[in-house]
Amino acid sequence: MNNAQIQVNSPDDVRNVVLIGNAGSGKTSLFEQLLRARVAGYRGEKDDPERLSQLYLASLVTGNVKVNLLDAPGHPDFVGELRAGIRAADAAIFVVAADGVDGMAQALWEECREANLPRVIAVTKLDAGHIDFDTVVEQLKDSFGEGVLPTHVPVGSGTGMNGTVSVLTRRFRDYTGGGEPSVVDDDTSHDDLIELHRGPLIEGLIQEADDADLMDSYLEGVDPGRDYLLNDLMKATANANLFPVIPVVASNGLGTEELLSLMEQGFPTPSLHPNPEFTRLNGESTGPAPTDPSAPLIAQVIRTTTDPFAGRLSMVRIFSGTVKTDDMVHVSGHRSHFGKADEAHPDHDHDERVGLIQQAVGTELKPKTAAIAGEIVMLPKLATAETGDTISSREASGVVPNWQMPEPLLPLAIKAATRNDEDKLSGALQRLAVEDTTVRLAHGAEDQLVLWTTGQAHADLLLNRLKDRYGVNVAQEDVKIALRETFIGKATAQGRHVKQSGGHGQYAVCNVEVEPLERGAGFEFVDKVVGGAVPRQFIPSVEKGVKSQMERGVIAGFPMVDVRVTLFDGKAHSVDSSDMAFQLAGANALKEAATNKAIVALLEPIDLVTIVVGEEYMGAVMTDISGRRGQMLGTDSDNHKVTIRANIPQVELARYAIDLRGLAHGTGTFSREFHGYELLPANLVDKFKKPDKEK
């Protein structure tokens, strides 16, 4: 064991590895197991709800390399943190429980595949019951492809599993003694087990490493030797073409040394893993950043934490160049360069001075004076840096693209619990948004404050942060839907505002016709007054009064849309008529026209929803859409996935982020965009009418 310290002089001294696996896979237990094997005195982290929801960094030293070990959340609510971990890492340990590959594991695999991230598969919980390792491997192949091949196989079974043997090197590791395993090289006692897997592995190497010489040797029956085979294994693994499988047992540490050895010898260095494209602020692309400590600085903020007292702490992956304490750097956030702008995270550019650089030493943070390309470090007190921002040299500033941020689709309406909380809420929400880029703050219907989240676990986490970290208590409300009122038939009405109270009076009469317009047409005011029945100077006053009443609504307190109001007659008084009198008369005319309830209706907002699920869940999802009053628009199938498009009322989507997860066993995704307004069914109108005092 050691204290996880090493002098990093070259990117080749570093391995950046992320552990990926769904909840219950044993991923975090394996993370702790790896640290205990290399960090002296490490006893494990205390239980912390925040720990399971965020990307976590620790380090260890194995052989001659420093491993920056990232533990990514497995819950689908925190896929943004997972994608941040994939951006920071050069390879992954993909953790799968031996009891089978579920939909969530397949979704996580797809995240890695899209990023072309090299992976080793760690199969956990092999000691639970009578689980056959070869059967598990076949299931993995069915789910993840033929590139899944065991490089180590377990000896024994169930609780009697006591070691592993390497298919390529024939090395046997015996874990029965506790502590570090004993090692036997060229062990012949497990030849039958080795030969069962050696042929398929070599054939996989021939194909995935594209090695013609190895194919010739194999066909001629010549063993090319362990070093040659290991080199091909490293090449195929680094190219994300072959995925070694290693058995893991938490109770006796089986598999730990195998993983550590593979991290050192088989995982790609930062120099071998492609960096993201770098774009100058003038839009000029310079290609991927070179992993060169002597090149200009290019780095990215992988995640941000905030503390009410210590301020911001930025986890930073350095792609190129070197950063030193007291350096002046350029911080850029330009989401508009790579997609739509984000109001919560506007484009920004600032020069900042780097403070004390901190590196992970085990699970502790310790200072260092400089960090080079390939490293992951923590930079405190970068006042303007947000997750996804680029840190570059001032002389050659620019941006690298963000990873795809998940769209928050579960709305949470909140309000301050007390006046004191109201004073603190705005600042606390701003800090939440800086730290968590998957949060979106919005003012919804009737100026309701809405926190858009990725799911229930995410919503609960944010509420706890507001209370525990920032001392702000909030109350939850039902999310209000932005309904509208409209006319669905013609009506004529007279609006009067006549008052005589002695002295100067008020007099205005206007006659209007109200008729519906097509959806989305808005409002149209037509003047058909003849003969000066309404003086010209008061016609705009009538229009202003009508518009004012439309904002307040006439039947349920919602704004009115898609109507034409025609002023065709009226009366005025030479002394008592005024601008205000005709405004009030116009408002009264619209209310009078609405006294026939049969020609006034409510409109509800409709979203175009695009849903992607596995083919096996298509029927359940479509039935559910029907139950939400949805209108099916079409479906497409591709690679066992179905894309369903439907128009669904917004009122039916408030909890859809949670409900779809249940329907599709955690694997369904969807997006939504505003489509337009449609008539609310008559049987639902009373549900949405406001009390008179709110109108």
Image: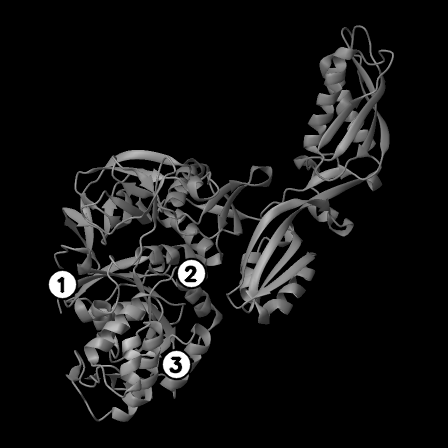
Dot 1 amino acid type? Asn
Q: Which residue is mark 2?
A: 114
Q: Nearer the viewer, residue 423 or 82?
A: 82
Q: Position of residue 1 (x, y in %)?
A: 13, 69
Relative image position of residue 237 (x, y in whole percent) = 31, 69
Q: Earlier in the sequence, mark 2 or mark 3?
A: 2
Q: Amino acid at mark 3?
A: Val
Q: Is residue 442 above or below residue 30?
A: above
Left or right side of 511 for 167: left
- Dot 3: what SS? helix
Location of residue 390 by image quarter: top left
Give the residue drawn at x 26%, y 77%. 255
Residue annotated with mark 1: 3
In the picture, measured across the screen, residue 540 lies left or right of residue 58, that is right
Q: Which mark is residue 137?
A: 3
Tell me: residue 618, above or below residue 582.
below
From the viewer's perspective, tell me whether residue 4 is left or right of residue 669. Answer: left
Disc 1 residue crowd, few under 14, some 14–19, many 20+, Cα 10 Å: some
